[in-house]
Each structure stands twice: as structure tokens, then as C-alpha cells.
Image (tube, coloured by chain):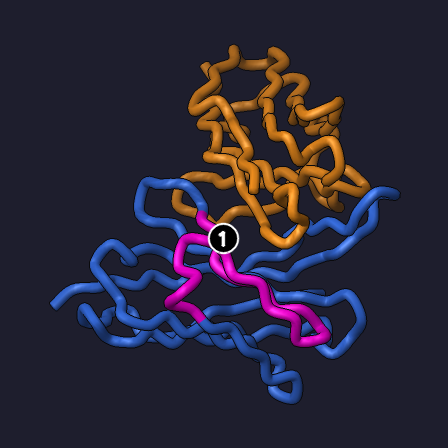
Chain colours: A orange, B blue
Amino acid sequence: SSELTQDPAVSVALGQTVRITCQGDSLTKYSVSWYQQLPGQAPSLVIHGRYNRPSGIPGRFSGSSSGNMASLTITGAQAEDEADYYCNSRDNSGKLVIFGGGTKLTVL
Amino acid sequence: QITLKESGPSLVKPTQTLTLTCTFSGFSLSNNGEGVGWFRQPRGKALEWLALIFWDDDKWYGPVLKRRLTISKDTSRNQVVLTVFNMDPVDTGTYYCMHRDGFHNGKSWNDAFDVWGQGTVVTVSS
């Protein structure tokens, strides 16, 4: 099995760029998708592991991956981006869905 | 347009069985590649993957509740049912179902959960 590791909390000044990372052994083989959970709401997909931004997601969100690490980058963070962000992929066996522990993003 | 909605009891007693239904539209779970998953989120905590059912009736279970879960589908009614046995107060939380979008990245099959239900809050208390 394997797991995904995220920093518990990250902060960014309004309008600046922030990178949220997700690390795991399985990421050398499996793709990562990213989800945003605004306070009191259900999670929603912000980065699809195949085609990046779903329809309706602002262009300031982008995803990338290298080796065993994937990143979600917000270029020009806005106040409304303050949320919890989760990454997901599969474990090394390919038979388990795994999620990171989430990163709480604060926009200062 | 894909939509999903969870339904079930909001309150169950310890040791009881919880049955949640996910009713969806906009896709058919009999079509190749489709899947529906269940997650839960204890209040103030991270998401936990519970189970995933595929179009071909393959079923995957997460480690969190593996021995206490079953997932099933009724394709004709566009529903997926999650059953959790022997509920405990620690199982209190919001339960979500979602649509699984499967894709191949050149190395392996992968999942993106592209549409989520609104969630249903379940409290376990006597």
C-alpha cells in the first residue's frame, strides 16, 4: 500500500502564487486529481488528472507532477480560494483509492 | 449533466446498520468505465474513501471500514447503495457519493471524482 502526504496548512498573500504539494510513492505511476472544499460545502474537482481544469474552474488553478510529487498551483490567489485542498490517486497496488490528508489554504 | 444525491437516515443508534442510497442521473452505471464511489468526512477531519463500484460490478473497499461495508448497484433505478454494519459514534460524519471518471495516463488506469453529491449528515447516538 502507499499514502499521500500533504502539508496540513499553507498561507499566501492575496494576489500571490501558492503551490500545494502532494507526495507519494505511487505517483510515479498514477495520476493525481485535486479537490477544493470550501467551508461548509461538499468537495469539488478543481484539477482532473487527465485534462487539468474542468469547465468553470478559473485559469489561475493549474496542476503538475514530477516523480513522486504532484502540485496544485494557484497563480494570483483570491480570497475565495481559501479552502481545504485534497489530492487523490491510487496506491501502489492500483486497487485502492487514496487521498491526502488535506491542506488548509489561508489567503492573507 | 451528471447529478448525484445521497439519502438515508440522519440518526442511527450504536450497533445498528446504516443504509445510504445514492440516486444519480446523467450517466448509466451499465456503461463501460463508469463508477460511483462513497466517501465520508468526520466533522472537522479529512475525507475518507469508503468504497467504489464499477460498471462491471467490480467492488473496491477502503481500509477504513472494509469489514463493515457492502456496496451494490441497481442499474435500472440509477442507484448505488452503501450499507455499513455495526455503526459506532465514531462513524458520525457527512457521507458523500460521487461519480468516478476513469482515465488512462499511458501507464495505468486512474480515477477522478468529477461530480459529488451534496452529502448527507449521519449521527450515531443512543
Type of amino acid at the residue the image marks with label 1: Trp
The tally of labels here is: 1
- Residue occupying the point 80% across, 47% down: B108
At mark 1, the secondary structure is: strand
Nearer-the-camera pick, A78 or A73:
A73
- The quarter of the image holding the N terminus of chain A is top right
With respect to residue A59, does A76 lie above or below?
Answer: above
- Residue occupying the point 52% across, 28% down: A5
Q: Which residue is mark 1?
A: B49
Is residue B15 shown to the viewer in this render? yes
| Residue A98 percent coordinates (x, y) | 56, 44
- Residue occupying the point 49% across, 76% down: B81
Please tell me how crowded label 1 is: few (under 14), some (14-19), or many (20+) other residues with Cα within 10 Å.
Answer: many
| Residue A88 percent coordinates (x, y) | 60, 41
In magenta segment, residue B63: yes
| Residue A90 percent coordinates (x, y) | 64, 45
The boundaries of the magenta stretch are B48-69
| Residue B53 percent coordinates (x, y) | 61, 68
